[in-house]
Image (cartoon, rainbow, N blue to C red):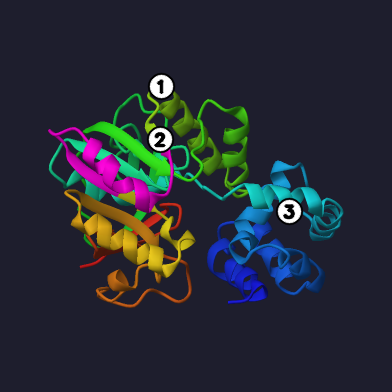
Amino acid sequence: MNTSEWYRSFAAMEARGQSAIYEMLAGRIAGDAGMLALLEELPEPKRQPNLLFAAVRFLGGPVDDYQAFRTWTSAEWDRVRQAMSERRTQTNEPGRCAVLLPVLAALPQPLALIEVGASAGLCLYPDRYRYRYDDGPVAGPAAGPVVLECHTDGPVPLPGGVPRVVWRAGVDLNPLDVHSAEDMRWLECLVWPEQHERLARLRGAVRVAREEPPLLVRGDLNQMIGELVARAPANATPVVLHTSVLAYLSMEEREAFAEQVRALPCRWVCSEAAGVLPFVDRRLPRPAPRDRFVCVVALDGRPLAFAGLHGQFLDWFG
């Protein structure tokens, strides 16, 4: 889709009901020839709505009024363009652990987690967070500083507890350091403006990661994944996991990754947007909904559920 269609789709499918500010900004940009011309100076992957809005906020620009946003962004476009060119969205949303937990808890324990596209590694701590599904009781470690809430539909196999994780590692083109104030400010700018609960749980997850930093390596996931799986402890189940990462790869790179990970001695757990992995989508028991953005949770390439982008809902297949 072209840039205008991308922003219009983002407003309708992703921001609506989640962020009125981002829905407004994306909808207005979709019909603004001047703003679209600026965005089209960038390579297509860098025109992403989340990346633009986070860059403006990171640089101190306004986002709650369109005319102020447009005036400031146009005047500061060189700085905005540089920030968008140098940075990636790298949205490190710990809430996504809520849709992975039922899968992880059912695997042979203990687990060695290997995340591709790990950002700061905040999704490597499913055992350190607490969980509330619907109106049920809170599960997880009593001292956990983060509670993840998730609405469910269907026969979700809710676990009685959290998985046992004995090793955590990740790979990213640009790993973020939980001890870096600038890196963590960038992560905070990636949280949508009205989502104060998301911001609070991000900060709680950062505190968790600072207590026990994971092993994060810089590199290409297709080049590093085999090495990381080989480094997992022998007494643990290696689990390669990722959430909303593969969309940033070409289809050829996705296919290469899927072929590689299926040949490795590991389990493969992911939550990726519908359409990102066509061979997974072909196994869906029903089509993905057209009126909202969904991810597909899958185990070893077998789809199990639809899920919210930020882990806010889990619709398990019967």
Which residue sits at x=72%, y=49%? 82
Is residue 11 one of those drawn in magenta? no
Position of 8 with respect to 233 (left or right) is right
Q: Residue 278 appears at what percent x and percent y? A: 34, 73
Q: Badge 3, how many Cα within 10 Å: few under 14, some, many 20+?
A: many
Mark number displayed over residue 86? none
For numbered disc 2, what is the local secondary structure?
Answer: strand
Please say if 287 is above or below 316. below
* Residue 234 is one of the magenta-drawn residues: yes
Question: How much space separates mark 1 and mark 2, taking CA atoms?
Answer: 15 Å
Q: Earlier in the sequence, mark 3 or mark 2?
A: 3
274 or 277, which is in the foreground? 277
Which segment is the magenta one? 217-240
CA gap, disc 3 and disc 1: 35 Å
Residue with the mark numbered 1: 211
Closer to us: 158 or 310: 310
Going by the image, does 211 lie left or right of 137?
Answer: right
Amino acid carrying mark 1 in the image: Glu
Element on which disc 1 rests: helix
Image quadrant occupied by the N terminus = bottom right
- Residue at which label 3 appears: 81
Task: Tell me, yes or no, if residue 56 can be seen here.
Answer: yes
Of discs 3 and 1, which sits in the foreground? 3
* Residue at image location 29% in from the left, 72% down from the top: 279
- Residue flagged by tag 3: what amino acid is it? Arg
Q: Position of residue 308 (x, y in %)?
A: 42, 58
Query: In the rendered structure, which amino acid carries the disc numbered 2?
Result: Leu
In the figure, is residue 312 to the left or right of 137? right
> Which of the two marks, 1 or 2, is nearer to us in this view?
2
Mark 2 lies on residue = 216
